[in-house]
Every structure is written in structure tokens, then in C-alpha cells.
Image (spheres, helix red, strand yellow):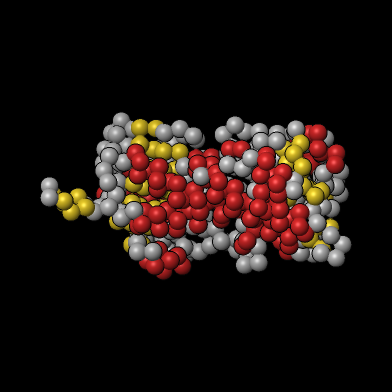
Amino acid sequence: MKKVLVCREKDERETRVSLIPDDVKKLISMGFEIKVVSKAGLKSGFSDEAYKNAGAQIVDSEESAYSDSQIIVRIMKPESIKGIQKDTLHLSYMDPFNQKELLNEFASQGVQAVSLEMIPRTTLAQKMDVQSSQTSLAGYVAVLNAASHLPKALPMMVTPAGTINPARVFVIGVGVAGLQAIATAKRLGARVDAFDTRPVVEEQVKSLGASFLKIDLGEMGQTDQGYAKELTPEQIAKQKEAQAKVCEKSNIVITTAKVFGRKAPRLIEKNVLDRMMPGSIVVDMACSTGGNVEGSKLFENVVTENGVTIMSGDMLERQVPYDASKMFSGNITAFLTHFYDKETKELKVNLEDEIMKGCLLTQDGKIIHERFKN
């Protein structure tokens, strides 16, 4: 298994590509054979000529190349898998908790489907973790987008005309996206507060120069995948009120609380937005899974009656496609390299490996992952 097909994304809003020319060249030097659909990398800044120079073959469409492909890589889940050959290894985001019909289709067609979201968050798999690489960039873009809409400067400025106080930024959720948002806001000179239900991240927040909001919620923690554990209704109510007091004083609020496989928790409701200053910005990075902020809309900005702008914060990595593609490609290359046998020059699907066991959902005509079996 060494014939790789790099697809062009069907969604017009998608700007990334799953493998960049530099990594194509690296994989070809190892023994992989790579086809790339024409214009797959164009929106990311990578031309067909660059892929040709790296040793790839350019094809007109993915459908025309399915019959001679053993490994298929793309960013988002496919619209259709018609024509993909039995036993092909397919890698992409899958949204597996909400795509049971697609999983059944992969299984019935005998395709081996890997969900990139399900790659274990372990030290060994860190270099393959697309979730972390992409949300890190999203956290950076969230701050830039908010700053560009904010009617005041972020840093403190001392001028002959007077002193400008720094903007206040409040980051709720200190995962990968939150940490990058904190770092970016600090680099731009803002005063930053942050909160997370996992007390263990307080030290990380302070190391970036931000203040950590302490709320005594009782027992808290994180899952074995590194995500925050779900709170009780009582804990949520207490958290919301403490956060509201900080939101009132903040110029920018960024919410990053996504719970994988479940609806996002509602962190900021209308009554909190009503208490915020006109001109304030709220970036909801969980719009696609229900939203952390009441009234947020996916891919749209909403302005409240009192002048608070709620910005959609999903898929922000698409705004920096060159680097997002570079990082995503590095993740895919690490995955393919990990399972590549140098002696046989073939990729082996090894279910004894914890990484493959964690992310391979379908094989041999059935759904094999314990979390998605019928």
C-alpha cells in the first residue's frame, strides 16, 4: 500500500490542501507514489507545477484516480465515496459522532476509514495531531479578527495627547486554541485574563503573562484525551456568573469550549451580552457544534442591540491556508511515515498499534471502532 491520492477539496470555503509539495517530495523519496488532483493546492499557494517538480503526477479529478489509489488523503469528509476501491485507506476529518450514515457507507464499500479527529492525544501521536495544529492557528486568527473589528487599540500607548489604556481580552477555555489566543493577545499588548475548568492549566496561563480567573467549582479535571470534563448544572451556573463579571470589563472575549462528540456548552447568554460595553467583540470558536455564545451564527457576524459584535470563530485556520496546509501536511506525513515499512516499502495498517487502533473506524466491511459500532 503506497499509491497516494491527494484530493482537491469540494467545499468552496475550504482553502487548505492535505499534502504540500515539500512533503510530497519526502514521501516519494521513501517509496510512495503520489497523484495530486489539479489545483488542489492553488488556494494555499501551491501550484500544480510545484507538485510536478516534487515528483507527483497531476490528475484531472479524484474520481478518475480512485481505481489506481491505495491511500486517499483530504481535509474534510467526502461528499461521496463512490468509486473508491475496497481496502483503500481513507484519511480525513470525519465528524464520526454525527456521520453514522457515512461510516456505514465506508464499511459497506470495504474502505478503511481513518478519522483524523480520533488520533489519540498521546506523546507519540502528537506530531500527527491535526486537531492541535489547526486549532493553534485558529486561536491566533481569532485575536487578529477581533482586533481588526475593535474600535480601540490593543496595547497601552503613551502619547503627547494622553495615555491609551490597553484593551482587555478574556479567553474562556485554555486548550491549544486558547493558549495561542492568549499568547497572541499578549504579543499585541493587551491585558489578558483566562479561565478553564481544569486548574492544571493555571501555570501555563501565568507563564504567558496572563491572569487566571479562579472559580471554585468543586471537583473538575480532564478526560484521558485531554479535554475538559463536562460540568454539572450547578457548576455551570456558578461559572457563568463569575465569567459575566469579567466579560463586563472586557473589550474582547474569546470562547474556545468545544466538547468532542457533544454539543458545545453555552457559556455566554444574552443577559451577559447586554451587560457588555458597546463596541466589544465576542469570538465564538464553537459555532459549528451549537455555540458557546447565545445568538452566534456559523460563518456570520452578529451585532446585538447594544452594539456587541459576535464573530463566528469556526474554521479560522482557513484564513492562513499556507501555514495551515503546511502543518496539516506535516501531520499526515508523520502518520504515513509511522506506518511505513522501509523493508517492504509498503504502508501497513497495524491494529496492534495504539494510534491506528484509536483512529481506524471501518475495516473488512464493518465498523470496527468500539465507540461507533451498532
**In this figure, what is the number of numbered marks?**
0
Q: Is residue 359 left or right of residue 222?
A: right
Q: Nearer the viewer, residue 313 or 266?
A: 313
User: Measured from the top left, where is residue 259 in percent x and y?
Assistant: 54, 51
User: Measured from the top left, where is residue 186 in percent x and y?
Assistant: 35, 57
Q: Nearer the viewer, residue 185 or 276?
A: 185
Question: Where is residue 196, by image quadrant?
Answer: bottom left
Q: Is residue 275 left or right of residue 117?
A: left
Residue plotted at (26% across, 43% down):
152
User: Measured from the top left, where is residue 335 in percent x and y?
Assistant: 70, 57
Question: Where is residue 35, by image quadrant?
Answer: top right
User: Measured from the top left, where is residue 200 in percent x and y?
Assistant: 46, 67
Answer whether residue 153 is visible to the viewer in this image. yes
Residue plotted at (49% across, 48% down):
138
Residue plotted at (76% across, 54% down):
28
Q: Is residue 18 left or right of residue 251?
A: right
Residue plotted at (59% across, 51% down):
326
Q: Is residue 315 left or right of residue 143?
A: right
Answer whether residue 359 is visible to the viewer in this image. no
Q: Is residue 132 above or below residue 59?
A: below
